Amino acid sequence: MTAAPVTSAAPEATELAVPLPLLRRALAHRSLIAGLVLVGAVVVAAVCAPLIAPHDPAAQDLRAALLPPSGEHLLGTDHLGRDVFSRLVYAARTDLRIGAVTVVVPFVVGTLVGSVAGYAGGRLDRVLSYLVDTVLAFPFYVLILAIVAVVGTGERGIYVAYALVGWVAYARVTRSATSVTAAQPWVHAARESGLSHRRVLLRHVLPNTLPQAVVFLFTDVVFVIAAVVTLSYLGLGIQPPTADWGSMIADARAFLTTKWWLAAAPGLAVVVTGVGLSLVADGLTDLWGER
Amino acid sequence: MRKAATPLARRVAHALLRAGGVAAGVVVIAFLLGRLIPGDAATALLGSRATPEAVAELRGRLGLDEPLPVQLWEFLTRLVTEGDTGASLVNDVPTRELILARVEPTLWLVAFAAVFAVVLAVPLALWAATHRDGVADHVVRILTTAGIAMPAFWTGLLLILLFSVRLGWFPVGGVRDGYPVSVVLPALTAAFAIVPILVRSLRVQLVEVLRADFVATLRAAGLPERRILARHVLRNAALPALVLVGTNISYLLGGALIVEKVFALPGLGDLMFDAVGSRDLPVIQGVVIYSALAVVLVTLVTDHLAALLDPRLRRAA
Amino acid sequence: MTTAAGRAERSGLRVEGLRVTVRAGAAERTVVDDVSFAVEAGGALGIVGESGSGKSMTLRAVLGLLPARARVKAGTATAFGTTRALGPRGLRDVGPGRVGMVFQDPLSALDPLARVGAQVREVCRVVGGEGRRSARDRSVALLTQVGLPDPAALARRYPHELSGGQRQRVVIALALAARPRILLCDEPTTALDVTVQATILRLLADLRRDLGLTVVFVSHDLPVVTSVCDSVTVLRHGRVTEAGPVAEVLTAPRHPYTRELIDAARALELETP
């Protein structure tokens, strides 16, 4: 897909020179920059929520409920009189944290299983691809809802459900990348020079397949954040009073016709975060494709 | 000509075998779902205030006192002979009947969503592919990136706001106005969820087709560009598009169930949410199994329909 | 509108100062550099060069059929009495189908999902402006003219059901359907078996004579070109290294690269008796 390398970073460059071409190449990718800026903005807002939010996100004031946007309340107040902008900022904390934590186990497990299966091939590989086919036959939300129903709602339910389901996609991505890499002549050469399978897989194959898994990681976080927000909208995810974009939209539903911004703002926050992460994924694909 | 039949026949046999294996795996996973409950399942399902008698009764009904292989065997026999995963814990109605009663809205919704998705995705992908690396391509890329990040329920709310509340074209929810008008907005919402994915894959396919020599042949022969696109390029991209819809049907169906909730459609999604709310295990297992089996079936059909429509794979008459 | 008289008009082809670049990332590479050639009406010109010499790009640029990353930067074409700058549509601007083209791989040059007869018929109808019945008759006549046996039955087949040689004949029929006066051939025999190559070359020679076509024939194969063409242009690294009548270039090559090509061809001839 990507064009052949044009800017040839000299491999024999001095130690100091190495980071510079990398940085320059990174800057040459507008989507990567745009993505990092968007994601960076959301992350900074989340981390610095107490500094940015003008009000306590949980402070209720029923006399000041459903106020329109103003200088005091940038996005107005909700039905309990809480400052919507402050809740929006604090919700970034919740949803980003859960999104990031959720993908850790699937990433590690899936990459490991996919690498081993793709490298070993044979029966192990066939068993894995059967398992992948089977899990992918379930409509994603149906399976997640079912697991959440069984193990319990809330943050823990999300982690367990996604740990059980999500690794499959990583395994599939890594498996195909690994079996392509493992067929390369230099992998055979590394084996014949006396290196153990473990060393060949970890030191020679994995560094070549990991970029694809990392790119997938970013697109997956987009997916997971959407799923977390969806579960919370349905009342099965983050429980009140913790601020989260999904439950904010659920609360706003009753006032959709008159106070549309209450539902629009948290949704936009989801979209901005997702677009940022997708752009980073696209940018990384371009960047690594150029090597 | 007999020889030409063999590859397709073998392909079908192989695919059927594989689909059967996946279906069996689906059932086993759905069964194990019930054993995933931490601690004692019956206590967990009934809540901590349940009487010991009620717990014992439920244990008996769920067959929890039997060894695991026996439980699985009973689960399988009931599914195969009765098409059922047991009676609802809430109202004692067999799961099969509950599901059959809710299938209609979901079928309307998914069918319309699939059609909308193709109708929206094909022109967008064609527009992007014919203007590769141009403004149109970038516009489509930005649209699909934003589309992937939009949660379906939020898209649904925006559509309700615009088309139902402001314009009054469609009902806000429910099925009182009958089909298909009741499912137009929900189907559009569910379609939006997979359009970005379809557009991206289809764009790649179309770029491939446009690069093919036969397009150059037809151009050199003097056929107008519009005709080449409509009669030849689109037809060549249609088969991969059909397969794409098949492979994404799982995602489409899952999204559709969420969308049902937003539009208050009394379909399988609604049944599923009620069951999740009351931890009605047999119903949850039933919806899980039937939706996954539907996915397996649809994927099998679209794959082979595409093969049947392709003269290169079809048996020579 | 092209009149019947306009269709019958013969035309030579002159291309001057053609420059084609290919974009690779941020850089642009020149693959065809200031290439000029000419054929008189009814003549046959061969363009020879190794792969990557820019000969295919040259031909595709004339008809505006370059791949997505390639662009015509300069160059004019003279044909049918007018001289025009070569744009993104190339000589297709002079009217639909007046310059035809035959491609290297006949399998990919035909729509895999349409019956071959339907493809020829479509061009007769849409470009030739013929009615349904006369388009059908003419498509069968064209398939006969390119030497296909039982053309009515063959027309109902799909491209993958034909042999390589049959497919190339269909591609030629397709190119002829729009009644072109100039035929561009891009390595038309390279993808075929050696035995089939000779029959396709003979067909092209016959068609050229019978229809009074002007032919430009691109190939890496010097003996093939000399058997079909009156004059030859040798390309290397996107530039013209030598040009002239076939006999002259073969007997007295002025450029060492041309001599290399000739020697290589001779050596091959000796190996395969």
Image (cartoon, rainbow, N blue to C red):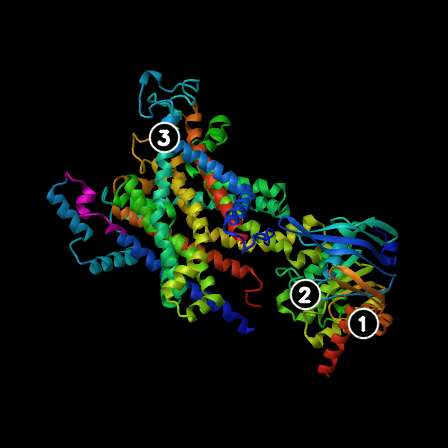
Amino acid type, callout 1: Thr
Q: Dot 3 surroundings within 10 Å: few (below 14), some, or many (20 or more)?
A: many
Amino acid type, callout 3: Tyr
**Rendering coords of residue C112 (x, y %):** 62, 61
- Tell me the tag on residue C226: 1
Q: Is residue B83 above or below residue A185?
A: above
Q: Are marks 3 and 1 in contact (CB under 8 Å)?
A: no
Residue A5 or residue B285, whichever sits in front: A5
Location of mark 2 (residue): C106
Q: Is residue C249 above or below residue C269?
A: above
Residue C104 or residue A181, whichever sits in front: A181
Residue C83 or residue A2, whichever sits in front: A2
* Extreme residue in the bottom direction: C273
User: Circle 2 sits in a helix, a strand or a loop, which is it?
Assistant: loop
Q: Is residue B238 above or below residue C200?
A: above
* Extreme residue in the left direction: B52
Q: Distance from label 3 to label 1 (Cα)? A: 79 Å
**Rendering coords of residue C22 (x, y %):** 68, 53
